[in-house]
């Protein structure tokens, strides 16, 4: 049954967007599952409340100007810490993704080429009103666009740099189907950090990610961005059934691709239609992975149960500019 615009669709239900195309709420269709009940979260996954003068300023700007941030819409547990540091994440190119990864609750559909031409100017306005020192631009996958949305990313970066020249910009991009020209478009826009998430270890890639994504494809994208002189970053989710040896291998593969910045966090099942959590990774295990990553040559590693791709991106990206391939 198709849910019409203006009515809230249940998780896994098909609905029609206000732009006139169909989508699946939360990305994965509702299924009859025999999976065991969802595990209770351990005490170390308690969410920290936000506070402080800068946090209040950012929140006030978001409320008064009706700004959209991934931080709020994804209920990120680190919103207080990041906003207090003048860092936030903005979602570009709409809220409907052309892919259906089994870990992600973003709605899935085909936007049929729709883009908001005013978004670059609006993104720059949002950054200025929020007084951001560092902004992460991320997006849904847009396989319906010839360049995957690379030119749109570049337009947003240009607009932000023009209006807020002191603000550092990180682009957490799709894989652009491995299109090196699209990667170059984003890198050459002047981003301070180029990021693309590997998400999981090789063995679990296709149970976890959409079939159009690929372990080697992501590594190739990151390597190309690095060879173009960009500081590069990636992320892995733990708790999906990977082994420590597989995590080490993935980290080494990222280093061989020239990646210098890495985040590691706990996978959390967004709805009962998504992959279940295989296990809760303890804080001391994350610390072990962080230390090992630094020894392996990463410039910086953020690791912890509550760490997400954009966690304290300002700190992770500090003193990292464009660099030559090493």
Image (cartoon, rainbow, N blue to C red):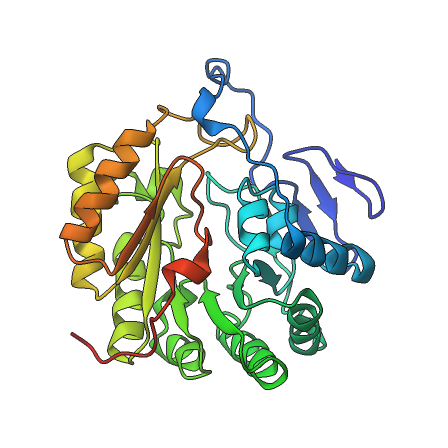
Q: Residue furthest right?
A: 6
Which residue is depicted at the point 49% across and 31% down? 269
* Whole-percent x, y for residue 136 in the image: 51, 63
Is residue 108 shown above or below 270?
below
Q: Nearer the viewer, residue 1 or 256?
A: 256
Which residue is depicted at the point 42% across and 67% down? 176
Which residue is depicted at the point 63% across and 69% down? 113
* Whole-percent x, y for residue 57 in the image: 70, 58
Residue 20 can be seen, yes or no: no
Q: Nearer the viewer, residue 12 or 192?
A: 192
Q: Residue furthest front?
A: 53
Query: What is the number of callouts on the image?
Result: 0
Q: In the shown orientation, is residue 326 left or right of residue 32?
A: left
Residue 91 can be seen, yes or no: yes
The C terminus appears in which quarter of the rendering?
bottom left
Is residue 112 shown above or below 239?
below
Q: In the shown orientation, is residue 12 left or right of residue 188?
A: right
Q: In the shown orientation, is residue 256 left or right of residue 80?
A: left
* Whole-percent x, y for residue 160 in the image: 59, 78
Is residue 304 shown above or below 68?
above
- Quarter occupied by residue 124: bottom right
Q: In the shown orientation, is residue 84 left or right of residue 62?
A: left
- Quarter occupied by residue 90: bottom right
The N terminus appears in which quarter of the rendering?
top right
Q: Nearer the viewer, residue 21 or 139?
A: 139
């Amino acid at each position: 049954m198709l849910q019409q615009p203006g009515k809230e669709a249940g998780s896994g239900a098909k609905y029609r967007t206000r732009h006139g195309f169909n989508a699946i709420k939360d990305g994965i269709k509702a299924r009859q599952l025999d999976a065991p009940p969802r595990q209770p979260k351990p005490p170390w996954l308690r969410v920290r409340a936000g506070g402080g003068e800068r946090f209040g300023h950012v929140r006030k700007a978001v409320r008064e100007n009706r700004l959209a941030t991934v931080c709020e819409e994804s209920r990120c547990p680190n919103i207080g810490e990041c906003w207090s540091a003048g860092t936030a994440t903005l979602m570009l190119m709409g809220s409907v993704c052309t892919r259906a990864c089994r870990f992600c609750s973003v709605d899935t559909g085909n936007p049929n080429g729709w883009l908001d031409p005013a978004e670059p100017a609006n993104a720059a306005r949002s950054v200025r009103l929020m007084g951001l020192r560092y902004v992460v631009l991320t997006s849904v996958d847009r396989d319906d666009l010839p360049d995957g949305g690379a030119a749109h990313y570049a337009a947003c970066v240009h607009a932000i740099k023009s209006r807020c020249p002191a603000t550092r910009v990180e682009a957490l991009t799709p894989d652009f189907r491995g299109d090196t020209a699209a990667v170059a478009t984003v890198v050459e826009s002047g981003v301070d950090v180029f990021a693309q998430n590997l998400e999981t270890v090789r063995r679990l890639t296709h149970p976890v990610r959409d079939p159009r994504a690929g372990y080697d494809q992501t590594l190739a994208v990151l390597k190309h961005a690095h060879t173009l002189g960009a500081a590069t970053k990636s992320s892995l989710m733990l708790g999906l059934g990977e082994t420590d040896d597989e995590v080490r291998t993935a980290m080494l593969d990222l280093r061989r691709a020239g990646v210098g910045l890495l985040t590691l966090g706990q996978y959390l099942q967004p709805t009962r239609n998504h992959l279940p959590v295989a296990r809760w990774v303890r804080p001391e295990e994350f610390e072990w992975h962080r230390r090992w990553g630094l020894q392996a040559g990463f410039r910086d590693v953020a690791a912890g149960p509550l760490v997400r791709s954009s966690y304290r991106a300002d700190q992770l990206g500090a003193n990292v500019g464009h660099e030559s391939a090493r």
